[in-house]
Amino acid sequence: RKGYRINGIDLFSGVENELPGWLRRQGFETGNFIKGDFIRLIPGQLKFDFVCSHGFVEHFINYKEIILKHTQLVKYGGYLVITAPNFNGIWQNKLHRYLDMENLNRHVLEAMNPIEWAQIVKAEGFEVIFSGYFGVFDFWVDVEKRNYFKQRLIKFINRISPILKKILPDGSGEYSPYCGLIAKRLLDG
């Protein structure tokens, strides 16, 4: 809606055919969509005005390399946006450890650190516009087998979440559900 042409890479089988068609039906201009492994992507001349990554970097032990690869795709004057869940916050961490351990184990908690992300991108010639946590309290779980007590506790948390959203401030590293970074490339890379 901001006039960008959307490009992408994913391992999802429909990324080359289904996704571009769906995006065009939504009124978006599409570019190239690659069914492939981002890690094997060689940036070369590929440079974009806006590179975004949501829920990706936190699945890699070598997350610093993954972030650096993102920076290589951003044009001079372009923007980089990275977001991830915040499973490091004390409340999010405790709830996921007790109620959603299988999901938690699929993530690299050390990678959920927007302050570190900021240091990485600054060293690559980016100005950091935002680095931190966002969203008021929210909690979700993946599908896994749970006992009756855990199921009831999840329902209770979902029932009180609207109240917590009204009384807790946005952007707490302790309970906000997300972390993120917005940065602008100032130096040609």
Image: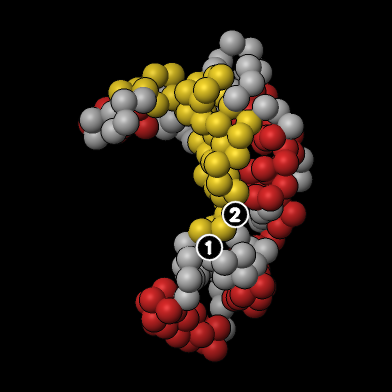
Q: Which residue is mark 2?
A: 132
Give the mark nearest the N terminus, 1 or 2: 2
- Residue 106 horizontal side relative to residue 17, left or right: right
Q: Quadrant of the N terminus?
A: top left
Identity of the amino acid at label 1? Answer: Gly
From the viewer's side, name the closer residue of 134 and 65.
134
Q: Are marks 1 and 2 in contact (CB under 8 Å)?
A: yes
Compute the Cα span from label 1 to label 2: 7 Å
- Position of residue 6 relative to residue 170, above or below, is above
Viewer-closest of 128 and 36: 128
x and y percentages locating residue 144 in the rendered image: 55, 69
Q: Quadrant of the C terminus?
A: top right
Residue at image coords 47%, 33% = 13
Residue drawn at (72%, 37%) of the image: 120
User: What mark, if any, has residue 151 been given in the picture?
Assistant: none
Q: Which residue is mark 1?
A: 171
Q: Provide residue 143's location: percent of width, then percent of height.
A: 51, 66
**Is residue 150 at least partly visible in the picture?**
yes
Which one is nearer the viewer's eye here, 165 or 107?
165
**Farthest bottom residue in view:** 149
Amino acid type, label 2: Gly
Viewer-proximal residue among 144 and 170 = 170
Q: Is residue 79 above or below residue 112?
A: above
Query: Residue 82: image x %, image y %?
Result: 56, 42
Q: Quadrant of residue 69?
A: top right
